[in-house]
Amino acid sequence: MPHASRTAAVRIRSLRPGEWRTYRRVRLRSLATDPLAFGSTLARERDLAETQWRDRLTHGPGGSASRTWAAIDARERFVGVASVVDVDGDWHVFAMWVAPALRGRRVGARLLDAGIAWARSVAPRRRVVLDVNPRQVAAHRLYESRGFRATGRTEPLGHTDGESVVEMVLGPRSPVRSTSVSKAPAPPRRGPSDRRAR
């Protein structure tokens, strides 16, 4: 299938709370595929209870606002995911991931744009914050293309010696790119617990 057609066939929409099993599958796949992109691990998350997966799609920290998006291809397969969560007055991008076969086709950009646009619609004066492993070069370039800038803050990745993440921030006045997002129900409340984005 041509490059443009494959990209157009992928739609972006927010996840419903009842889709926790599908979310679990794509989240575990992301942890298995790209372990250095996230602050959590496959071993830590594969045994989480149903209530914990449901909670990720229905609550933010302390009941705060959040939303999780999925990228879905023409065969109804979930091929990407990203969450935006209210943490201490900032929006945080968590658990962003795109299936390897669709990287470089703007799927990640569309997920990120959907998250930023939603965050701006809810609380436009807040910063949007994320952490990224510098080894994730494509992700770093994507974030920079959307106006994210490194703050100078770094911290260890945690589960892998010698790996670290850098914090990036999008200021409240940064422009928002428009993106095509399918209509979905009211926002779920709470995303993944780790702060690593990809």
Image: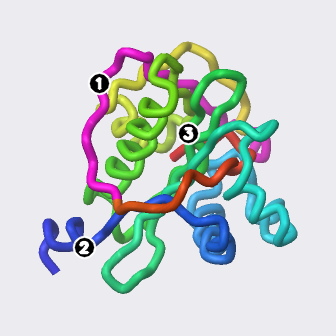
| First of labels 1, 3 by sequence position | 3
| First of labels 3, 2 by sequence position | 2
Residue located at (27% from left, 36% from top) = 177
Q: Which residue is mark 3?
A: 93
Pointer 1: residues within 10 angstroms few (<14), some, or many (20+)? few
- 101 up-or-down from 121: above or below: below
What is the CA distance from the residue labelled 2 to the residue labelled 1? 26 Å
| Residue 43's disc number | none
Residue span colored magenta: 158-181
| Residue 9's disc number | 2
Type of residue at label 3? Val
Q: Quadrant of residue 42?
A: bottom right
Pointer 2: residues within 10 angstroms few (<14), some, or many (20+)? few
What is the CA distance from the residue labelled 1 to the residue labelled 3? 17 Å
Find numbered disc 2 in the image and state the secondary structure of the residue it sits on: helix
Q: Quadrant of residue 28?
A: bottom right
Viewer-nearest residue: 117 or 171: 117
| Residue 175's disc number | 1
